[in-house]
Amino acid sequence: MLKTWMKRAVPLALAMAWVALAQDTAPLKLTLKDAVGLALKQNPQVILANLQVSQSQQDRLLARSELLPQANGSLSEAVNRLNIHAAIGISFPGLPTHAGPFEVFQGGVSVSAPVFDLTLWRRYKSSKLGIETSRAQETTAREESVMLVVSQYLGCQRAAADVAAAQSRAELAQAVYDQSADLQKNGVGTGIDTLRGNVQLQNEKQRVIMAQTQLQTSLFGLARLLNIDPHRSLEIADQVNFFDTPAIQLDQTLEKAYAARPELRALKSEQERAALAARTAADQRLPKVEFSGFWAQQGLAPDSIIPVYQYQGSILFPIFTGGRISAERAKADVAIRQLQQQETELRNRIALEVKTAAAQVESARNEVDVANSGIQLAREEVTQARDRFQAGVANNIEVITAQDELARANDNQIGALYRYNQARASLAYAVGQMEALYAK
């Protein structure tokens, strides 16, 4: 019975393993939204930014712990032997030279707490701002990751469109070559027409090979950005959407960009932290009030243990620090001025990016309209040239010329569509809405 079961189980397990392996090696077909979502989950830069946020949260907990009371328990047993003469610095007749050895048992709790220390409070507030800075930096990493993936995906769409256009032109060249060969066979055409058509056909086949190679390399780059297993192939599912020109549903005002760009938010948090650092340096001149003490059970033997304790309050204030406090405050003031200058430069850069992207979107949209008209005219030119060649009115030079014009029109259309979609992505990034537009 067991042997029969094993004979059935082993082939079944092998079949299941083969199915799992086939699933793992199957091409991964992704839409643009899927690619963006995958990048936000496993892009190394996004993961590192998430870890930085977690580290900032732990820094806040550490800063808060310095504001709270600290308590420690202890339990000890010690054996002591004292030199009495050395302890008091003089010897007396009849006074023993030593005491012990004797054992001391002790167990208790020690407590310390800051009562008044503004520097600790400032550091705690600074750690909270550090979390805001890390979160803004995380958003920056996410926006940049989405921008890279969208740009690479658009590049893959462009390469796929180039492949489709090249294949279409190759089919047209094949039809023209066949037409020339038929006319020559029927005694109407000439050998030079057939030869010319064959040369054009080979050229178009070469363009197909180059376009396919470009598509593969673009897909390799996308897989690298998405951190996908190199052994697994990748395909894009939004190839047709490349020819769409959706409207721009984004708030393009500079005020919206200033409020949404995470780099500016991170810079503002850093400015607040620098201001807190300056106050912390100034607060070091103020007195600090601390409380400490301990309570324990102590004795020479377990049956002689009695409570012992010590409590004390202290006030600490600086008298001479060698210029350290002044230097720390001056350093913080310099950092504030540096951050203010960076904010000015960043605002100017954001304004330039928004205006440039908006202008590029408008220009690219007009280019798409002109390119669509151009490709329609080029197709009509090819049709008329083939009709004239078929009627014997002209040789196939007109057809070859029309094919070249169609190739340029195709390139113009694909380039214009790529620039429009890229400009649309650049505008979304400039106004800080990259993830909102492409990931949701």
Image (spheres, rainbow, N blue to C red):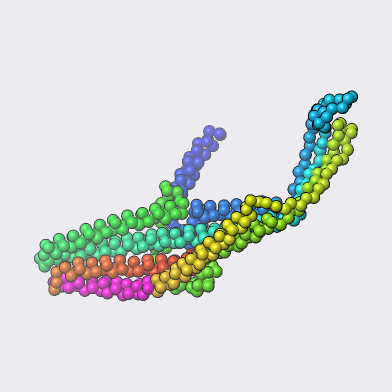
Q: Is residue 397 visible?
A: yes
* Side of 187 relative to 120 (left or right): left
279 relative to 292, above or below: below
Magenta stretch encompasses residue 48 = no
* Side of 370 relative to 103 (left or right): left
* Side of 55 relative to 385 (left or right): right
**Residue at image location 47% in from the left, 68% down from the top:** 348
Query: What segment is highlighted magenta in the picture?
Result: 363-392
Front residue of this view, candidates 213 and 296: 296
**Residue at image location 44% in from the left, 66% down from the top:** 426
Image x and y of residue 294, in percent: 81, 44
411 relative to 373, above or below: above
Q: Taken as a whole, is the magenta stretch helix, strand or loop?
A: helix
Image x and y of residue 156, in percent: 38, 59
User: Splitting the image into 4 quarters, where does residue 209 fall?
Assistant: bottom left
Front residue of this view, candidates 299 and 236: 299
Front residue of this view, candidates 69 and 132: 69
Magenta stretch encompasses residue 368 = yes
Image x and y of residue 102, in percent: 83, 28
**Residue at image location 41% in from the left, 66% down from the top:** 422
Task: Give the total number of marks visible in the rendering.
Answer: 0
